[in-house]
Image (spheres, helix red, strand yellow):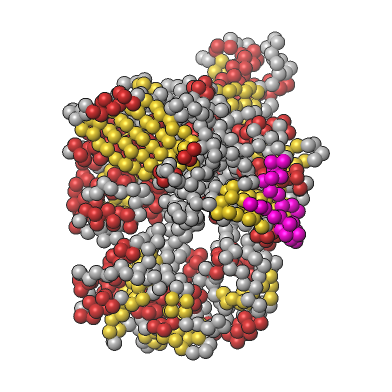
Amino acid sequence: MGIEGIGARVARKEDKRFLTGLGRYVDDMVVPGMKHAIFVRSPHAHAAIRSVDTKAAKAMPGVIGVLTGAELKNDGIGNLICGWMIHSKDGTPMKMGAYSALATDRVRYVGEAVAVVVAETRGQARDAAEAVEIDYEEMPAVTDAVEALEKGAPQLHPEAENNLIYDWEIGDASAVDQALDGAAHVTRMKLVNNRLVPNAMEPRAALGHYDMAEDHFTLWTTSQNPHVARLVMSAFYNVAPENKLRVIAPDVGGGFGSKIYVYPEEIVCLWASKKTGVPVKWVADRTESFLTDAHGRDHHTEVSLGFDADNRMVALKVDTIANFGGYMSLFSSCVPTYLYATLLSGQYAIPAIHCNVRAVYTNTAPVDAYRGAGRPEATYLLERTVETAARELGVSPAELRRKNFIREFPYQTPVIMNYDAGDYEASLDAAMREADYAGFPARRDEAKKRGKLRGIGMSCYIEACGIAPSQAVGSLGAGVGLWESAEVRVNAAGTIEVLTGSHSHGQGHETTFAQVVASRFGVPLEQVSIVHGDTDKVQMGMGTYGSRSGAVGASAIVKALDKVEAKAKKIAAHLLEADESDIVIENGEAKVAGTDRTLPWFQVALAAYTAHNLPEGMEPGLKEGAFYDPTNFTFPAGCYIAEVEVDPETGHTDVVQFVASDDFGNIINPLIVEGQVHGGLAQGIGQALLEGCHYDPASGQLVTASYMDYTMPRAGDLPSFQVSTTNTPCPGNPLGVKGCGEAGAIGSPPAIINAITDAIGNNDLSMPATPQKVWAAMRRNQ
Amino acid sequence: MSSGELEIGVEPTESFLLTTHYSLLTTSLIDLEEENPMHQTTYHRASSVSEAVKLLNDADDGKYVAGGQTLIPTMKQRLAAPSDLVDLRHIADLKGIEVSGDKVKIGAAATHAEVAENAALAKACPAFCHLAAHIGDPHVRHMGTVGGSIANNDPAADYPAALLALAATVHTNKREISADDFFVDLFETALEDDEIITAVSLTVPEKAGYGKFPNPASRYALTGVFVARRADGVRAAVTGAGENGVFRAEAIEKALSSSFDASALDGVTIPADGLMTDIHASAEYRANLIAVMAKRAVQAANG
């Protein structure tokens, strides 16, 4: 295809406005008469609310309204839901505690919203928020999921005895136990996957506008899936019926999963707008983001991996405790189950796998999907365990992996997933070549002369993207289908608008999707516009998360393009007096194959709209829609190799080399794919080395509530990445694409930790591997 | 404007100055007016030390500000709410850096960036410039001042280690205070309420070096050690580690007094007693870092 089509390194169209400050985010939106909301939040991790007195606050200057949870309830606003039903192994449904958008009788984490103040200015709202008098009766708190399960732990929700939400399992426990009993070697580990704070560059924001004349609501919100937000708010929260609620997610500055969910603030802004009669805007400050954005990860896991005498894997047993925070967020339940345990086979042929997961309430912010969502947790435990096994068995980590790779496809794992295609050895070989794996000992010796401990570590990850076949996820408890929609509108003069149900908040859809369209008809990229993020413009869609936009969103566009092309060919055949099957559309024109008879693309479009000369019986117009429901997940995979140098005196780790070899199937825009990998790697290395969300165990206060204490990765913390791709096209979708948005965050943490533990000769190391922890681990060696 | 009063958020220019910490690039000045994350306060820009004292004494609950890199974020979090802010940063007498012979005098309102970039100082005491160049980020270095930093006496700030190791003198509008007496405890100095630091002075050391292990998140010193060899002996001061703020490390001074070489510190161990433990570093780890950073400081000094 041409220089702007599929496969071309096209610079992102949207970057012009982002880089020149012209992006339009929720906080840029101004509605006449708009006022400002500040939430009154719990300073306690766990407390009963005895009373909420708003009288003094209401008398403050500029205050328009002060609203409480009791009023919210009275108005029939529903509790927040969790959209994926998980059943415990005893058959009982998950135990979900009530989650009100504004707390009424109890608060369960620091930062939970209790009341909202609407005032003329944010400053006045802040002042009045301090005047809301809430009488709390403090209760003991528990922040650690393991402790929350223990006898005598503080109890959060009456519905969930012992704080246990569900006790779920997958796989054949007895087969696994039997195989482990007979194994020649079993590697056992206890691993913690550290809690992370998402930290999107743009904090969450909401602007709710109730139009009394039309009895209609509009919500501008920082959402990754505005249609899902509308559906949930109308079907479950009773804010307004769907036809009376428009949700707009304009430019959104990063999501990483944290903007999938419908949060209390959006619901409250809509409700408060009707209640107070003014449009209500709320924008989180950074502290609120730390306290209330859904956090990620936070698993405690015990794992056993058995090998036979020939070092082939025979069984994997996993027992995980997952921290859910004080309430169940919208998709929290599926993350440590169907997005986690189903990936535990990794790239390996493991005949027997069993995983048990206990989901637990604690007095912390709700936890939900965060870049990778379950798959980083699965990859971390599997890849650390495999690396450890290689050390215990005295074999090369690369060769142990190679020996156990799945080589025939499709491959049915013991944990639901059916891998459709892959070539894991190709990624491994490519990465080892790029990393000069064989030359490592010389580099290690050279580093030693400089007083540095150099280590190498690898990680061979697999993930499941393209979520998901609707019937399949429905049978597993999903409350929604996970198809995607598209509408392709060819305008009368031939320019094209694509309305997609996917949502771009950094992924570059305005460029990649346009490339897919431009490729199809050979029209210039600038003649293609992508429209998304507005429920009044775009047909129902499911949004963007789980690296699904290429595999599912673009596939829907392709399906719509098929229909447009078919009609365009009919029109062209009619006008060119040729047989429809002889018409080819390329390079911006329709032509009769093998002749010099052509018709410019815009004339085909024009003919469709003038309708002066269309085939008998054809409707005018050139606009087609499609819904695409995938037949399977897609399975990106790859191999990452990290090299680190540790300062033995301080424990400081430098990542000196990082090689990523990914198989994303076909690639629409390599430049954007590389950018996605770079960003993912930065987040993954951030998790491995720097980012650790810490609650004070006694008080339940979030200690790492700002950048003074929570370490985000900076450019200087990262090496220049060496990224490359291999390609086994995905057989399941028309473009052969797999998804690339999360791979970096999924594959990199174990590679980093494996490299550090190799460098220091001590495997007892948890993330984030801060200098202090690495130093302490080295000391334990002595 | 020399000393006029204004309310924060009303006058765009001053809002601009006071809110540089707060995503200026994306927030228009009009927005800042409505934003007003702090309690209402009144800003005064003093043009002289005496005017500053008067402004403070006239205020209900006033506070000096000299860069505001700690105070303003604290106010935005509503953890501090002074009725008035008296800005010392633009007082002409407090500006400037003078190096004459082996004497150095740094005006209290000199910014970290000015200290870092001063050519004469770089020649006289490069370690001092190096220290200033590694405070915070460019934003902070162009707003924060020497006087503001030492008056705040954050236990993880960099300057206190330099001043103590260099046996510097703190000049105020009332007296001269030796660094030994100036730094009292966490966020506590010998300053009286309305006392204003005008300058710090020091004698150029024979050799000096600063070893800093930054907190990975904040870039404050997780542990920093400033060593200086002077005619009257070796001094080594530690910041970021002590439970009571900056302190002199006797074991290090003793070892370096016999030989001002990193190898003299081999085998020197620092007890963890009296050192801070927090989520970033245990007392034991800080004790280790003191020894390591002292070595690196000496290496830098001998560089």
- The residue at the point 40 percent across, 73 percent down is B244
- Marks counted in the figure total 0
- The residue at the point 37 percent across, 31 percent down is A355
Residue at the farthest bottom position: B175
- The residue at the point 65 percent across, 23 percent down is A623
Q: Could you tell me which quadrant the C terminus of chain A lies in?
A: bottom left
Image coords of residue A560 (percent x, y): 58, 23
Q: Nearer the viewer, residue A356 or A260?
A: A356
Vertical arrangement, residue A60 with respect to residue B261, above or below: above
- The residue at the point 29 percent across, 40 percent down is A189
Q: Nearer the viewer, residue B284 or A241?
A: B284
Based on the displayed image, in which of its 4 quarters is residue A613 positioned?
A: top right
Vertical arrangement, residue A84 with respect to residue B151, above or below: above
Image coords of residue B162 (percent x, y): 38, 76
Image coords of residue A224 (percent x, y): 57, 38
Image coords of residue A216 (percent x, y): 75, 37
| Residue A582 visible in the snapshot | yes
Q: Is residue A745 magenta?
A: no
Query: What segment is highlighted magenta in the picture?
Result: A50-74
